[in-house]
Image (cartoon, helix red, strand yellow):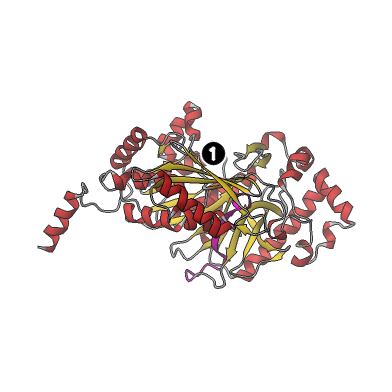
Amino acid sequence: MGMDRGMATAEARGYEMSTTNQGDLYSHVVRYVVAPLWAMREKSPYLRHYKKFLRTQYRPLEEVRADQWKRLKSLLEHAYARTRFYHDRFKSLGITPADIRTWQDFENLPLLTKDDIRANRDAMVADNIPKDRLFPKKTSGSTGVSLSFFVDEDSLQWKRGCALRHDEWTGWRLGERIGAVWGNPEYKKSWRGYVRNVLLGRGTFLDTLRMDEEAMTNFHAEIRREKPTLLFGHAHSLYLFARFVQQNELSPIRPKGIISTAMVLHDFERALVEDVFDCKVTNRYGCEEVSLIACECERHHGLHVNMDTLHFECLRDGKPAPAGETGAVVVTDLTNYGMPFIRYLVGDTARMAEKPCSCGRTYPLIESLEGRIADYVRTPEGEYISGISLTENFAMVLEGVKQMQIVQDRLDHLLFRVVQGEDGQDQTLRADIAHLVQERFGSSMQHDVEYVDSIQSETSGKYRFCVSKLDGAGVFGAGRP
C-alpha cells in the first residue's frame, strides 16, 4: 500500500521511479583500451600520474610537506636561473634561492599579482623550455582585464592526472558518460575534437551562454537518453538547470555524482541541486592560471587542498589566517616551469577548517570559499561585506525576485539589477530593498533599482551575484608586498 501511494505521488508530479545511472559496457572499453591507447598516441603520461596520485593520496602530512619542499626548492632555483623576472626580483631582495631555507623564508617573498604578470609576462617565461611545449592560456577577465600566460606541456599532464583522481572522488569512473553544463565546449572547435569526445570524453553539453527553455529541454532529453553518471558544470548554471527541471516537473535524472565548479556554490543552490538529482554535490575550486586548487571528497566536509601540484596559503594581514577566519588565497604552482607562478595572489578568499577530514586524507581542508575579493562590497565606513553574505541578506529574503545582481560602481552607491518574479510588486520591492540597504550598509550608502528582463552569465559562463567596480587591492592586507 505504501509503495503504491509513493508511486502515485511520483506520477502526479510528473516523475517516474528510477535508479542511479550506471556505466555502460563501452565505458569499460574506454577505461582499459581507448584511454591507454589514446594516451600512448599522444605520448601523454597523465594516466601514470593519475595512478601515482591514487597510491599517494593517504600519505602522512609530513611526507607530503617534505615532497612539496623538495619540489619548491627545485622550482625556485629554476625560476632564478631561467627567468629574467624572478632573477631580477631575487636580486632586488638581495637574496638567492639558496637563502630560502625554511617555509618562513619562503613566505617572506613578495606576492605575485595580476598586474605583475601583465607587465612582465615575457620576462616570466623560462628561456630553456621549447616554444612548442608552451601553451598559451587566457582568463575570462570577469573581474577586469583578462590575463594572458603560458603553461608547459609537463604541467598540463600533471594537472590532467590529478583532476582525473578528483573526478573519481564523486563515484564516476573514467570512460563513463558526462553531462556538462558548460560554455563554449572545446570539442566543437575541430573535427578531431568531435571524434575525441565521441570515443573518449563522452560529454553531452548544455552551453551556459544559451540557457533558454528550448536548450534546457533538449539537454534534459539528451541526458535522459544518454544516462551520464556525472553532471559537471558552473555552480549557478547547475542550479538554474535543476530549478528548471523541478519547476517543469520533468522526469528524473540520477547521476552517481555532481561536480560544481568555477564559482561559489551557495548553500541554497546546493540544497536544490541535491534534492532534484537525488545526489550529493562535490564542490570544486580552481582557476585558469593554476587549474585545480581544492576539491571535496566523498565525505563532503570541506575542500581538500591540492597539495600534489600546488603550495597553498590563506593570508590575513600578510600572515597565515587562523582557522575559521577569512583570508586571501595565495598559491604556488609546483609544476609549471614554463612560466612559474610563485606566491600568486589569486583574488579569492577562503576560510580554513580546524580539523582534518574523516576520510583519512591529510590534505588541509578549506572550510568555506568566501568569494572573489572583487565581489566584496565596501562601505564608506571601510567595512568589507562578502557577496556570499549578501546573497543570504538580500536574494533569499526578498519576495517577488526571480534573479538579482548587486553592482557597486562608487564607494557610496549600489545598483540593484532585478529580474522581477510574477508575484513581484514594484513599490513593496523597492521599499524592502531600501530597508535592507539602510540596515546592512548604513545611511551613507545610496542605491538605485533597475528592472531587467534577464541577467546573463558572462562570456566565461559564470554568473556573479555581486560585482564590485572598485579597486580591490589590499583586502585582508594580502596585497601588500
Secondary element type, mark 1 = loop
Q: Which segment did they paint magenta?
A: 358-376
Q: Is residue 212 left or right of residue 359?
A: left
Q: In the image, 55: left or right of 312?
A: left
Residue 254 visible, this orientation:
yes
Indicate whether residue 367 is drawn in magenta: yes
The residue most toward the bottom is 355
**Res 279 → quadrant:** bottom left
Q: Residue at x 39, y 53 (%)?
A: 257
Q: Which quadrant is home to the N terminus?
A: bottom left
Horizontal and vertical percent position of residue 79:
78, 49
Q: Quadrant of residue 130?
A: top right
Q: Could you say where residue 26 lies in the image, as x and y percent from the top left?
A: 34, 42
Count of marks overlaid on the render:
1
Look at the picture and state if 107 lies above or below 333: below
Residue 480 in the image: x percent, y percent?
A: 77, 56
Q: Residue at x 87, y 58 (%)?
A: 95
Camera-side residue of 195 and 416: 416
| Residue under the image location 88 percent in, 52 percent down | 91
Q: Which amino acid does label 1 sit on?
A: Ser
Q: Name the residue tied to disc 1.
A: 460
Q: Which of 290 and 236 is in front in this view?
A: 236
Which part of the image, by quadrant, shows the C terminus? bottom right
As drawn, is 322 to the left or to the right of 403?
A: right
Within 10 Å of disc 1 (Cα), the crowding (few <14, some 14-19, many 20+) is some
Please tell me whether residue 85 belongs to the stretch shown in magenta. Answer: no
Is residue 128 visible in this depiction of the protein? no
Q: Nearer the viewer, residue 153 or 372?
A: 372
Residue 109 placed where, x, y %? 79, 58
Determine the residue located farthest toward the top in the rendered image: 191
